[in-house]
Image (cartoon, rainbow, N blue to C red):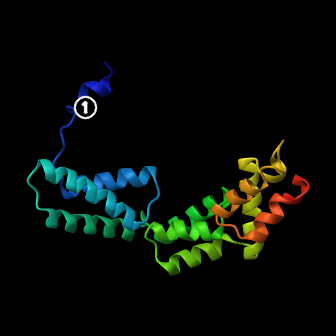
């Protein structure tokens, strides 16, 4: 038995939630992950709900604690929705996601439209068509479709087009990537 195992609490035991414990959980979570304010609030409320099932705590008071903790962390700069949106958009674009898919991802995360639009403008340095075309090439390379497919390229063309279409790329971009003669065009 390691030292850590000896000090852990019994399995299934849920600690009672306090304002201080919520703050500790939030800071620990933000040390590991970047998150928008709405997502952090959802995580803390799950902790409150779990504790409320076992202990007698006032859920409304705990929700007030959660709001106070999130506001405090926003004020201290630990939580910044605009920074999160820029980083997430840059990461998704680098992974070959289309602008449409990136915007949907950010909006699905609870970010406001103006924050999403600002993040997209900051991330896309070239025109929108070129950014999508570059992302489509990255996706094609990663998925080994189109000119990156080693064999059976003609028989798999429709499936390859479908992969790019489901990723949010328009028909002209998908066709230009899938029908390219060589991979020299991706740069």
Q: Nearer the viewer, residue 70 or 57?
A: 57
Residue at 29% x, 52% y is 24
Direction from residue 90 to residue 161 in the image, left or right: right
- Would you place residue 82 above or below residue 56 in this image? below
Q: Residue 180: horizontal and vertical position, in percent?
A: 87, 59
Direction from residue 99 to residue 64 in the image, left or right: left
Is residue 187 visible in the rendered structure shown here? no
Q: Residue 88: horizontal and vertical position, in percent?
A: 56, 62
Is residue 176 visible in the rendered structure shown here? yes
Residue at 74% x, 61% y is 136
Direction from residue 52 to residue 150 in the image, left or right: right
Q: Locate the C terminus and report the quarter of the image it occupies.
A: bottom right
Element assignment for label 1: loop
Residue at 25% x, 24% y is 6
Q: Locate the N terminus and report the quarter of the image it occupies.
A: top left
Q: Nearer the viewer, residue 120 or 82?
A: 120
Number of marks: 1
Give the residue furthest to the left: 56
Q: Residue 173: horizontal and vertical position, in percent?
A: 77, 68
- Would you place residue 67 above or below residue 185 in this image? below
Direction from residue 18 to residue 79 in the image, left or right: right
Q: Nearer the viewer, residue 162 or 13?
A: 162
Residue matched to label 1: 8
- Would you place residue 27 above or below residue 38 in this image? above
Residue at 64% x, 66% y is 168
Residue 10 occupies quadrant:
top left
């Amino acid at each position: 038995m390691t030292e850590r195992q000896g000090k852990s609490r019994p399995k299934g035991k849920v600690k009672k939630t306090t304002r201080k414990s919520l703050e500790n959980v939030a800071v620990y979570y933000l040390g590991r992950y970047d998150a928008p304010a709405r997502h952090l609030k959802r995580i803390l409320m799950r902790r409150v709900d779990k504790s409320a099932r076992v202990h007698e705590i006032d859920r409304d008071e705990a929700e007030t604690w959660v709001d106070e903790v999130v506001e405090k962390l926003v004020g201290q700069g630990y939580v910044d929705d605009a920074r999160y949106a820029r980083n997430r958009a840059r990461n998704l674009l680098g992974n070959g996601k289309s602008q449409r898919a990136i915007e949907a991802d950010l909006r699905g995360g609870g970010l406001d439209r103006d924050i999403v639009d600002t993040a997209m403008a900051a991330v896309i340095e070239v025109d929108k068509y070129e950014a999508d075309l570059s992302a489509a090439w990255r996706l094609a390379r990663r998925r080994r479709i189109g000119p990156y497919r080693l064999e059976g390229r003609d028989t798999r063309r429709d499936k390859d087009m479908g992969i790019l279409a489901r990723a949010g790329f328009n028909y002209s971009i998908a066709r230009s990537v899938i029908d390219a003669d060589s991979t020299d065009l991706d740069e």
